[in-house]
Image (cartoon, grey):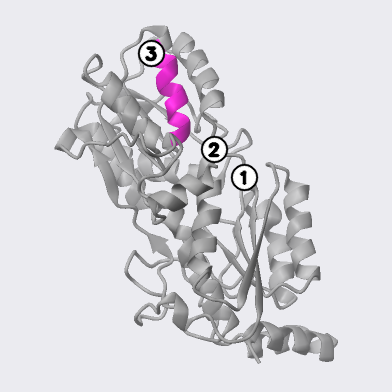
């Protein structure tokens, strides 16, 4: 009997002592610490390949996102399906909530009621949805959020968690930008949904912390991230307004390079020189744009920290380990590798044989990337 089944049986059989039964059945689920680094593991052991985590019982896994209307989300879903394709006993369903909190909670509740074995989720709403995740966990569903912090505690509110190492990401961006601008320079940071997004705020905090350590290297033009809605057209409109409002923008940072393309177009349309940009989660077209505009905008240097869509694969392995009672030897903090660094000669490419939205740092093959956008 797998852990998920064990927990459901305990709840059904002994309603008054459900919490104790759940704890007994999930004793080998991931521990509650978010302090690891890439390459480290939750219990110090060697990470297991996916085919050793599958188990032999039929499993149903749901992938639920609070928002799904961009290329990053599509690639992430394809990465998850590709990862779990190694497990012929696993079926995957996907739902996204169009930035609607109630729709997101309904999806979590629905998959719980249907008896799914696990829910892997990008919680765009933070702690607002934590009760739904905890209810699923308490009902015997293995729950593994990724990237966006839902609040709560691993082992109490859900079974595992993996995020970017936001402190390292922000530190890398801040130090890279600091090499190119004067102290106290004007920085504009873009990212996230209009109501605020946990992952965006975490990166903002990491960057601002290093800025303070560097003697307040940057003077941010806003008190919080300028929303991009993770959409290039939305960011282009927002950046056009910013360019009207701020006569001086010395550097740019963002959490989603795909939407940053809209910001760059706003600079071009306004006839303003493009400053250096530090970002993550990029695509093919952003590399093309740098190659197109750098010669006439010599200050337009580009840093990208990528491999972001592969994090969902770690979440999948955590979920399978929890379901099947195997050790969770996956990292809880993933250090994003540098993919492009034009300041140090690591130049982008422009692949005309791939769609503009293709994430060239993805673990998917070129053929798989083509299929995502067909």
Q: Residue sitting at 67 percent across and 75 percent down?
A: 117
In this view, the residue in front, 309 or 195, is 309
Label 3, label 2: how many angstroms apart (C-alpha)?
Answer: 23 Å
Q: Residue sitting at 67 percent across and 82 percent down?
A: 4
Count of picture labels? 3
Q: Which quadrant, please, contains the C terminus?
A: top right
Q: Which residue is mark 3?
A: 268
Instruction: Indicate left or right for 46 with 107 as reference.
Output: left
Task: Name the mark on residue 192.
Answer: 2
Disc 1 crowd, CA 10 A, few/some/many (<14, 14-19, 20+): some
Q: Which residue is mark 1?
A: 68
Q: What is the span of residues highlighted in magenta in the rendered image?
A: 258-268
Q: Compared with residue 207, is residue 259 higher up or lower down, i.e. above or below? A: above
Q: In which quarter of the view is residue 173 placed?
A: top left
Q: Compared with residue 44, is residue 299 higher up or lower down, i.e. above or below? A: above
In this view, the residue in front, 229 or 157, is 229
Q: Is residue 343 one of those drawn in magenta?
A: no
């Amino acid at each position: 009997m797998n852990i998920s089944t064990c927990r459901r049986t305990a709840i059904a059989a002994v309603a008054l002592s459900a919490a104790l039964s759940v704890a007994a059945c999930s004793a080998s689920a991931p521990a509650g610490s978010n302090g690891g680094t890439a390459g480290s593991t939750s219990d110090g052991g060697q990470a297991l390949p996916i085919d050793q985590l599958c188990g032999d019982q039929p499993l149903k896994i749901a992938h639920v996102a609070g928002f799904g209307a961009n290329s990053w989300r599509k690639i992430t879903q394809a990465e998850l399906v590709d990862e779990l394709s190694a497990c012929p006993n696993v079926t995957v369903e996907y739902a996204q909530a169009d930035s609607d909190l109630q729709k997101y909670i309904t999806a979590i509740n629905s998959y719980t009621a249907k008896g799914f074995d696990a829910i892997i989720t990008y919680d765009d709403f933070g702690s607002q949805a934590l009760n739904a995740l905890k209810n699923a966990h308490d009902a015997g569903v293995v729950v593994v959020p990724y990237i966006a912090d839902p609040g709560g505690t691993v082992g109490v509110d859900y079974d595992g968690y993996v995020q970017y190492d936001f402190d390292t990401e922000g530190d890398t961006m801040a130090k890279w930008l600091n090499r190119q601008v004067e102290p106290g320079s004007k920085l504009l940071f873009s990212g996230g949904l209009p109501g605020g997004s946990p992952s965006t705020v975490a990166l903002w905090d990491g960057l601002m912390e290093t800025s303070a350590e560097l003697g307040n290297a940057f003077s941010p033009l806003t008190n919080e991230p300028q929303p991009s809605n993770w959409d290039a057209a939305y960011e282009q409109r927002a950046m056009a307004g910013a360019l009207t409002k701020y006569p001086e923008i010395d550097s740019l940072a963002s959490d989603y390079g795909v939407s940053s393309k809209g910001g760059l177009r706003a600079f071009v349309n306004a006839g303003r020189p493009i400053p250096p940009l530090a970002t993550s989660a990029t695509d093919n077209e952003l590399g093309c744009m740098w190659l197109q505009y750098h010669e006439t905008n010599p200050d337009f240097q580009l840093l990208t920290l990528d491999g972001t869509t592969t994090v969902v694969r770690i979440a999948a392995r955590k979920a399978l380990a929890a379901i099947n009672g195997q050790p969770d030897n996956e990292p809880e903090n993933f250090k994003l590798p540098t993919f492009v660094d034009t300041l140090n000669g690591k130049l982008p490419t422009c692949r005309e044989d791939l769609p503009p939205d293709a994430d060239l740092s993805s673990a998917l093959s070129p053929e798989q990337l083509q299929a995502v956008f067909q």
